[in-house]
Image (cartoon, rainbow, N blue to C red):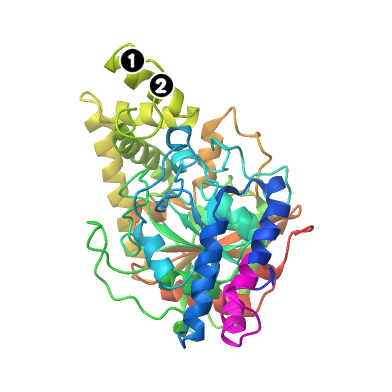
Amino acid sequence: MHQMTLAEIARGLADKKFSSEELTRTLLARIAQLDPQLNSFISLTEDLALSQAKAADARRANGESGALLGAPIAHKDLFCTQGIRTSCGSKMLDNFKAPYDATVVAKLAAAGTVTLGKTNMDEFAMGSGNESSYYGVARNPWNLEHVPGGSSGGSAAAVAARLLPAATGTDTGGSIRQPAALTNLTGLKPTYGRVSRWGMIAYASSLDQGGPLARTAEDCALLLQGMAGFDPQDSTSIDEPVPDYAAGLGASIQGLRIGVPKEYFGAGLDPRIAELIQASIKELEKLGAIVKEISLPNMQHAIPAYYVIAPAEASSNLSRFDGVRFGYRCENPKDLTDLYKRSRGEGFGAEVQRRILVGAYALSAGYYDAYYLQAQKIRRLIKNDFMAAFNDVDLILGPTTPNPAWKIGAKSSDPVAAYLEDVYTITANLAGLPGLSMPAGFVDGLPVGVQLLAPYFQEGRLLNVAHQYQLNTDWHTRTPEGF
């Protein structure tokens, strides 16, 4: 049962080939057996999962149906879950049990999903390799000595290892698409505002967006259907109708115009990945797509702009963690200043502290105009580049990452080297665009992804193209040895 996709599980449950409870027990046993070598979960929720599975079986027995009714998933551990630890991968929130469900959690629960647990992640979603987690690095099932990507690394590792069919993630600068690429999954970052951020612990509020991680585009369509929609509790949620994503998967891509930016194929890209991207282009051309070269001239400024804007927002968002109201508190503080200093110094890890310091500096009185304001101007130029490109093409294609997954610890002494792994993904967050990564092959036995970007609210088109590609390739069907 563990090899089934979400779509296959939905059909099996509808045909009464097995029950949700049977499936849940099978996967919980598999997690207990295999996750110690992966470290993909922070918390398991066996009792909740079994009660939700029994409830889903009862709903089906009463005549209800639905693609997600009885389907097992897991949530990245920054989605608040009522009465369950929501740690954000940090010592700061190690003892925090959320008093409510995030909108994403509530919507998926209402659709009948079964929550198996909360997955490992970079602390406060800050990282590209899942190496900053207070609970230790999650490991890539394709090679346990390598990272699974980040910050949604636990979700990616768990799905890639067939511990469960799908999981939620969040994407601030590529944190769904990059781990999807490094673990041979399909991952989708929706348009900013498509999925509610209410109850999703914030890193950088103008960049964060929740989305699905699964093995296929079809599964991502099913999970996104349950996650997306307007939420009046989230001031950045957009009141836009949600289409039936699964229904649109069968459309032809004949005549679809795909742009390939020349800036994507510079010196930083592994030439073996470049070859795989070209092979993907040829597959799409066989299906009728028209491919042309385009330019995104301001892409070179994306990383410096992102690493001013994101830390600036993080320094503001994380100021609430002060040892007073909730979360970690130092022992025996001498006074209020000592409480603040030691609670934050002991509760936050090195990467989070680094970004808070950078962000506070960028927002300080003497440097706001020189750094933060300039970064926001670059952000507008990057968005304008995309808008100009989408006048000529329907989608933009390129590599998801410049390199395959690196060895655990290989970039620990050089944070900037890890930041550069996000070079192809962060522009979509700066512009608020939807993006998808899908499996495109292997380099040295490690997976590689191809990225598709679309105009606002065109998630359906991304999923359709990825699905058609997956009907004609088998990369997404490959399973890591031993799993």
> What residue range appears in magenta?
5-24
Q: How crowded is mark 1: few (under 14 residues within 10 Å), some or many (20 or more)?
A: few
Report if the CB atoms under discs 1 and 2 are less than 8 Å apart. yes
Instruction: Indicate the position of residue 143 as horizontal and vertical percent values.
Output: 74, 49
Q: Mark 1 points at which residue?
A: 338
Q: Mark 2 points at which residue?
A: 330
Instruction: Indicate the position of residue 20 as horizontal and vertical percent values.
Output: 58, 74
User: Is 317 or 404 nearer to us in this picture?
Assistant: 317
Q: Does the magenta stretch include residue 374?
A: no
Residue, far top: 334
Residue, far right: 482
Q: In which quarter of the image is the C terminus?
A: bottom right
Q: Establish if 365 lies above or below 59.
A: above
Q: How many numbered discs, if any?
A: 2
Callout 2 amino acid: Cys
Q: Establish if 414 lies above or below 432.
A: above
Residue positioned 43% across, 33% down in the render = 92
Callout 1 amino acid: Asp
Residue positioned 48% across, 56% down in the render = 169
Q: Establish if 394 lies above or below 359.
A: below
Q: Does the magenta stretch include residue 22?
A: yes
Calculate the distance from the C-alpha at mark 1 to the C-alpha at mark 2: 9 Å
- Dominant secondary structure of the residues highlighted in magenta in the image: helix
**Which of the marked residues, 1 or 2, is nearer the chain's N terminus?**
2
> Mark 1 or mark 2: which is in front?
2
